[in-house]
Amino acid sequence: MSEPADSPEPTLTTPLLASSPPLQGERVSFTGTLGAMTHAQAGELVAQHGGEATEHVSRQTTMLVVGEEGWPLEEDGQPSVKLQQVTEWNAEGATIRVVNEADFLHLVGLSERRDEVRRLYTPAMLSRLLDVPVHVIRGWERAGLIRPVQKIYRLPHFDFREVNGARTLSQLLEAGVPRAEIERSLRNLPERWGGGDRPLEQLELLERDRHVVVRDEHGFVTPSSGQRLFDFDGEPAEDVTQESSEDEGHASLPFQQKPQSEHWSARDWFVEGCRQYVDSEVDAAIESFRLSLMTEPSNPEVHFHLAECLYRQKHTRAALERYYVAAELDQEYLEAWTQVGCVHQELGQLESALDAFDIALDVHADYADAHYHRAETLLELGRAEEAVGHWETYLEHDSRGPWADIARQRLANLQSEI
């Protein structure tokens, strides 16, 4: 497949007549997932600015807008049909402009929405938007599949596009699309539309997770999950990778069996607990975290993960105590204080919940989740007017997803009552 032809960028500084809308005469189509709005909303925006939005591309199309949330890839791993078609026509001499979403927003006078497209997300926000459990997102981070752009008081913040891209790659591999096919498509995407080295690196990590083990000082281990394998040969530890092909199955891998763990460190037990939790072996994960704490009892991360397991197994009060321990060991542990508040709220201890959310906001005033939960608690206490500012602040940081919809509905209901 040929590389997409270089298309001229929209001339954003060209002066227009006052009576001439910026998209006058344009036939615009969209491909990929938009970050700032739906395709339907974008189509309405095109019409408002003098253009015509079309569902399909044709030789009469003048502009193709590529969404910045995820990549323009189909379920078979190929670049989107629209992008392929426009690329082919441009190679034949057509002049269809292919622009990214940020340039489109600037063209229609919505430059401020570009910040929304490129906003950073916490694990909880991503969980709601992608319908992926929080512990899976944390597992991706530990595996190196996704990298936080920044950490604020232990709380990682991720670029949505990278996380959504990792999920897309995982889904394509699980659906049986050959890695070579996905890699070919990624190489044919310019970097600004999802190409570049990072998605290829993610693809390699995902594929490795399925077929590669590495020997460390304790034996064989699967790099991304931390799964340890029993080594019958007892060979000296060295940096070795062993790969298996589809035909060989696991013939070249050591037999998978419970590892000898008498010499494991606190870190080993923590990694094992995280793996078990991701694999839904929650009771086993609880025991692994407890064994980790026997050696390193003052590690707030381990207490927090133990609390998550206990909560998942409906040991609510035991989980609350562990969240408190994590927060006591690190008094600026944002997620721990917020979880303390959430559990108190669930138990009907609303004033205690407010106290915990206040502590979280004292640590980091822009923590969206704490604003949302504090607003909901205030509403439950019949203090809806005090909640307004917290819902508004939440929406400044997270304008999409189910919680954002609830926040907007709460504000609309209050406005209608005035």
Image (cartoon, rainbow, N blue to C red):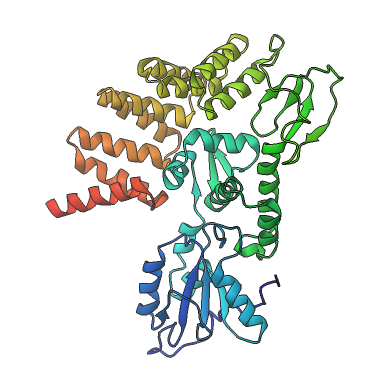
Name the residue located 63 percent from the left edge and 78 percent from the top edge.
88
Q: Please say whether residue 418 is visible from this viewpoint.
A: no
Q: Is residue 202 left or right of residue 117?
A: right
The residue at the far front in this view is: 247
Name the residue located 36 percent from the left edge and 79 percent from the top edge.
47
Q: Up-down: is 381 above or below 409?
A: above
Could you say which is closer to the camera, residue 96 or residue 387?
96
Could you say which is closer to the camera, residue 297 or residue 59?
59
Name the residue located 49 percent from the left edge and 28 percent from the top edge.
333
User: How far across and how far down the image is residue 332, in percent?
Assistant: 49, 28
* Count of numbered tags: 0
The residue at the far left in this view is: 417
Q: Quadrant of the N terminus?
A: bottom right
Q: Please say whether residue 370 is visible from this viewpoint.
A: yes
Q: Up-down: is 111 above or below 20?
A: above
Q: Is residue 305 left or right of residue 407?
A: right
Q: Is residue 169 left or right of residue 286?
A: right
User: How far across and how far down the image is residue 411, in percent?
Assistant: 24, 50
Could you say which is closer to the camera, residue 359 or residue 318?
318
User: How far across and how far down the image is residue 70, in percent?
Assistant: 54, 57
User: How far across and how far down the image is residue 24, in percent?
Assistant: 43, 86
Q: Is residue 188 left or right of residue 81?
A: right
Q: Up-down: is 21 above or below 158?
A: below
Residue 55 is drawn in which quadrant? bottom left
Could you say which is closer to the camera, residue 115 or residue 210?
210
